Amino acid sequence: MPTDMTRRERVLAAVSGGPVDRAPFSFWYHFRLEDPAGSSLASAELNFFRRFQPDFLKVMHDIPYQLPSGVAVLESPSDWAKLSVLDPYKGNFGRQLDALAQILKGLGDDPPPVIDTVFNVFAQAEKISGKKTLQHLQEDPEPVLQGLSVIADSLAAYAQACVETGLSGIFLAVGGASYSIMSEEEYATTFLPLDRKVLDGIKNRAVFNVVHIHGENIMFDLVSKLPCNALSWSDRASGPPLSEGKKRFAGGVIGGINEQKCAEQTIEEFISDVRDALAQTSGRRFLLGPGCAVPTPKTEAEFEMWDKRISAALRELESFDYQW
């Protein structure tokens, strides 16, 4: 078994199915910053990394998708035609890229893999339309489809800018791929090609692209066909379990931490989930992480509890018999 791997070596080996000295881990939460980009975000992410030392850093992306001047929300189908492709180096995207550059600089000469959260086309569309995307598509599909394509082009350009900035890839948070929201045909016909467009431009340049399937009743097999190195979903809260997901996806699987219960779990309960995840996956092609963002710690006692959870989890990851 390899020893003393760097974080980057450990993560890339895990997603490719190679031997690791231990399974990688990471977790994430929203910082609830007054200014969610630029120097404030960079400082929050660097402080997070220095305290918890995760194997990869998933940067939070809480600055909104930028609408044209004078447009607050897409109120009608015709409003979608007002969208134009965004320059990834300007506006809100530019401020996020500035934060990413500061983070990479602050991590030094041997940084872990850093990936930025990119909410997919449907998730962005819901935010800028007041959750009327599907309604508008039914009412007048032509301008809406035009606008959705513009969003995809904007996100694809931003993803490429992330890689050019020095990131290892992106964390594409896929909303909408849920039977509770739309049919499989709706997602496969309209939104899956747009999500693929975002990833296609970087799939041969990024080394650690993660696709996260958000929500319950997810279209696992459909989304798992997107080009990525690792797949993330809420394995504890909604399923499928890691063992099943690993059979249906050839890359790395991220999970094991129940984001809905972890803040209230005892250390013993938390570690029981870690042990179960290791048993389900044999520790291979496995990265320990939450199924979605965990609750934001607010008090020093809550931060200290995370210190204890991570220390205990690392002991489990290091002592596990991986049998390479």
Image (cartoon, grey):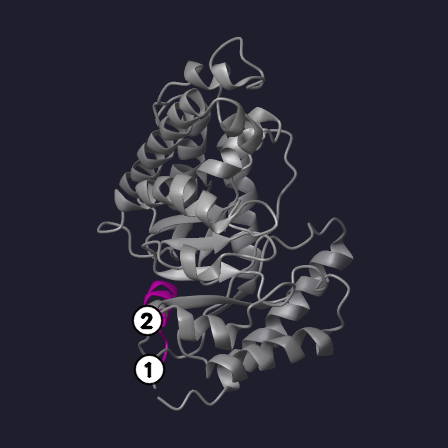
User: Which residue: 55% across, 72% down?
Assistant: 241
How far apart are the alpha carbons under marks 2 and 1?
A: 10 Å
Magenta stretch bounds:
3-14
Residue 63 shows up from this direction:
no
Q: Are marks 2 and 1 in contact (CB under 8 Å)?
A: yes
For badge 2, the amino acid type reads Ala
User: Which residue: 52% across, 48% down?
Assistant: 183
Task: Tell me the quadrant of the picture where the C terminus can be found.
Answer: bottom left
Classify mark 1: helix, strand or loop: loop
Q: Is residue 151 above or below residue 228?
A: above
Residue 211 versus residue 77: which sits nearer the camera?
Answer: 77
Q: Residues within 10 Å of mark 1 (few under 14, many from 20)?
A: few
In this image, 31 relative to 25: left or right?
right
Callout in the foreground (2, 1): 2
Q: Position of residue 186 (x, y in %)?
A: 46, 43
In this image, 255 relative to 222: left or right?
right
User: Which residue: 31% across, 41% down?
Assistant: 197
Q: Is residue 251 above or below residue 114?
A: below
Residue 214 versus residue 255: which sits nearer the camera?
Answer: 214
In the picture of the structure, the residue carrying the numbered disc 2 is: 13
Q: Position of residue 309 (x, y in %)?
A: 65, 69
In the picture of the structure, the residue carrying the numbered disc 1 is: 2
